[in-house]
Image (cartoon, grey):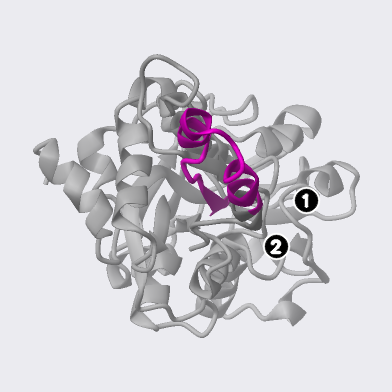
Amino acid sequence: MKDISKLALTAGFILAALPGTQQGALAQEKTFITIGTGGPTGVYFVSGNAICRMIHKEAAEGRDSGRKHNIRCSAPSSAGSTYNIAQITEGEFDFGVAQSDWQFHSFNGSSEKVTHNPDLRAVFSVHPEPYQLIAAKDSGINSWMDLEDKRFNMGNPGSGQRATTELLMERYGTPREFFSLVTEMTSSEHSTALCDGKIDAYGYVVGIPNSGVAVATEGCGAYIVNLNSDVESGLIEEFPFYGPVTIPEGAYTSTVEPVSTFGGYATFVSSAKVSDDVVYEVVRAVFENLDDFKALHPAFSILTPEGMITNGLSAPLHPGAVRYYEEKGLK
């Protein structure tokens, strides 16, 4: 983790020349943290920036009350789960949002599609995120096997939906040749491409509701396909981080009845190398302002403190997070 930025060091040299009381008031070092998120239309991006918002809300510097933690936070758009984990491993990100399955695989080294990081640590889970197969209006796609000879977007390399789509392709026995065209667009591109008639369907792992999905469902009548075959049941049985998910009627205007699929959770992760004190303050900022946090996106509305410290978490909890949970009697 980058505890002291070049900016902070430069400021320290400047402050050294200031009179005593002013220097003491201003020279307290700041810690700058970065959270990896996802595409700008996805819930990952909202999640990371909502966490930053809670951190800055708690900050007392310049105000009469609050926490003097001196933490400053940024949450830029990124390529998603596996990319965020890779950047945490390299020390470029301090935290990241990642699918629960890729948290599991990264910590256990059980997939070549994500960086093996035994130092990966869970912080809390954010929201359930089902795998959604979005099909164009009048495409005739009512199951995975109906994608034969269709134009399908599997997601950009490094994204969670790309990795999960590849797993489904493997288990269904549908290689790239099964489709007439396979594209690798990002989450900010695929809905527009669907409405423009450039693709027939795309896979997306995201919380509900999602503004990007709404572009397709509300904008051009796209719909979500049921994925409840033996393939999905087998994945749920094989991997404890998956579970059945029901997308409720009315989630989008084209969702006229519940849709059955499967999925995991969006989880907030870090590294054992990140300071316990920093992780403690980040967790405290979110949990002490949970109602405000939940109000920032409908996908957060069902969050509970108890669920957030268990759902989808397969890497060990970071000691800084454990400290807060034990203080509050949650663990």
Does residue 310 show up?
no
Residue at 54% from the left image edge and 42% from the top image edge: 73
What residue would you read off at disc 2? Answer: 155
Mark 2 residue crowding within 10 angstroms, few (<14) / some (14–19) / many (20+): many
Mark 1 residue crowding within 10 angstroms, few (<14) / some (14–19) / many (20+): many
Tag 2, which secondary structure? Answer: loop
x, y (%) of residue 168? 54, 70
Measured along the vertical axis of the image, is residue 297 above or below residue 201? above
Does residue 201 show up?
yes
Mark closer to the chain start, 2 or 1: 2
35 lies left or right of 244: right
- How many labels, in total? 2
Q: Residue furthest top?
A: 64
What residue would you read off at disc 1? Answer: 190
Residue at 76% from the left image edge and 81% from the top image edge: 177
Measured along the vertical axis of the image, is residue 85 above or below residue 48? below
x, y (%) of residue 33? 52, 51
Q: Out of 12 and 50, give the one closest to the viewer.
A: 12
x, y (%) of residue 274? 39, 62
Residue at 62% from the left image edge and 63% from the top image edge: 159
x, y (%) of residue 286? 37, 34
Q: Is residue 14 magenta?
A: yes
Residue at 50% from the left image edge and 79% from the top image edge: 115
Q: Out of 35 and 223, give the one closest to the viewer.
A: 35
190 lies left or right of 270: right
Tell me where residue 328 sits by quadrant: top left
Tag 1, which secondary structure? Answer: helix
Is disc 2 in contact with disc 1, using a CB cutoff of under 8 Å?
A: yes
Q: Out of 117 and 25, give the one closest to the viewer.
A: 25
The magenta region covers: 10-36
